[in-house]
Image (cartoon, rainbow, N blue to C red):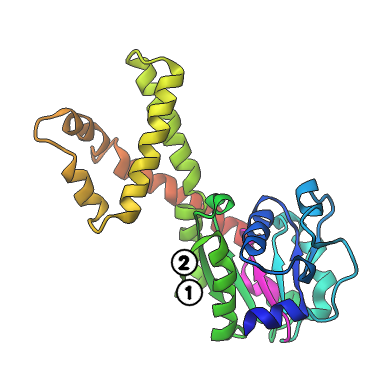
Amino acid sequence: MWRDDLAARGLVLLGCGKMGSAMLEGWLKDGFPGGSVWVQDPAPSDWVRNRGVNVNKALPDRPGLVLVAVKPQMMAEALPSLKAWGGGQTVFLSVAAGTPLSYFKTVLGENTPVIRAMPNTPAAIGKGITALIGNVAATADHLDAAEALLSAIGDTVRLENEGQMDAVTAVSGSGPAYVFHLIETLAEAGMSEGLPEHLALRLARATVAGAGAMAEMAEDSPAQLRVNVTSPNGTTQAALEVLMDAGRGFPALMREAVKAAAERSRELSRG
């Protein structure tokens, strides 16, 4: 029912960069009608222009949902133009990093249902994960509809409170970059042991991708999976004694990295 209602009233994308385009692609593949989508973007890509959606055209009077996907620094200019849609009939779904729910309340009014979401870049291939939290005006039906839309780009989780969003940003929002860096450094380490660059990079990519898929599918915890591939006094144990060192290994380094990202997220939220 929510989908039919949304298709009838219209879905507006305020900003359609990489994340907005990934979501749009997922919706269209899932059968959502392109004619019911309005994209507002100052520089839409050729891909967006050729998707059969309404690009920079007159907007519907009262759309069912507005996806706010502009960059945080553009928010102050873009959002006030939609103030007429505040008040309750239109749901706002924001994927803009560092923009708290309180900002939307100030601009759009306290009765406006707003859902804040934090997706990550694997959404571009339908393998993302998105955390979401709604304000007091967002009903269970609103959250269900947002979750259904976001499921087009991967998995979803709901937060207990907005304060958790900074940690989500640090773990899953920024996390893909940590994994990409792991691939980089693993390949470089292989090269230092005599592997040619192309082979070291191929091995590192496939290893991280395979281990990630295995961790996602397995019933065992990551800790147990680690134990399963670690033979006593073997090569893996020798490496793990370095990586798991309490002072200079992954545990301390990752805590420090995630804390730095979370602190920066808090700074951005405070403006």
Please determine whether, in this image, residue 252 is positioned above or below residue 62.
above
* Circles 2 and 1: CB atoms closer than 8 Å: yes
Q: Position of residue 64 (x, y in %)?
A: 72, 79
Find numbered disc 1 in the image and state the secondary structure of the residue it sits on. loop
Tell me the distance, in whole angstroms, between the alpha carbons under discs 2 and 1. Answer: 6 Å
For the C terminus, the quadrant is bottom right
Residue denoted by label 1: 161
Q: Is residue 262 visible?
A: no
- How many marks on residues? 2
Q: Residue drawn 62% across and 72% down?
A: 101
Please determine whether, in this image, residue 45 is positioned above or below residue 236.
below
Q: Is residue 40 visible?
A: yes
Please determine whether, in this image, residue 42 is positioned above or below residue 270.
above
For the N terminus, the quadrant is bottom right
Q: Residue drawn 73% across and 58% down?
A: 70
- Label 1: how many residues lie within 10 Å, few (<14), some (14-19) or many (20+)? few
Q: Is residue 38 left or right of residue 178?
A: right
Magenta stretch containing residue 10, yes or no? no
Q: Is residue 40 left or right of residue 226?
A: right
Q: Return the residue nearer the eye: 189 or 256.
A: 189
Seen as rendered, the residue at the extreme top is 194
Q: Which residues are magenta?
A: 89-104
Q: Position of residue 182 (x, y in %)?
A: 41, 35
Q: Which numbered disc covers residue 177?
A: none
Q: Which numbered disc covers residue 164?
A: 2
Q: Amino acid at mark 2?
A: Gln
Q: Return the residue nearer the eye: 30 or 209.
A: 30
Which of the 4 image quadrants contains residue 76? bottom right
Magenta stretch containing residue 101, yes or no? yes
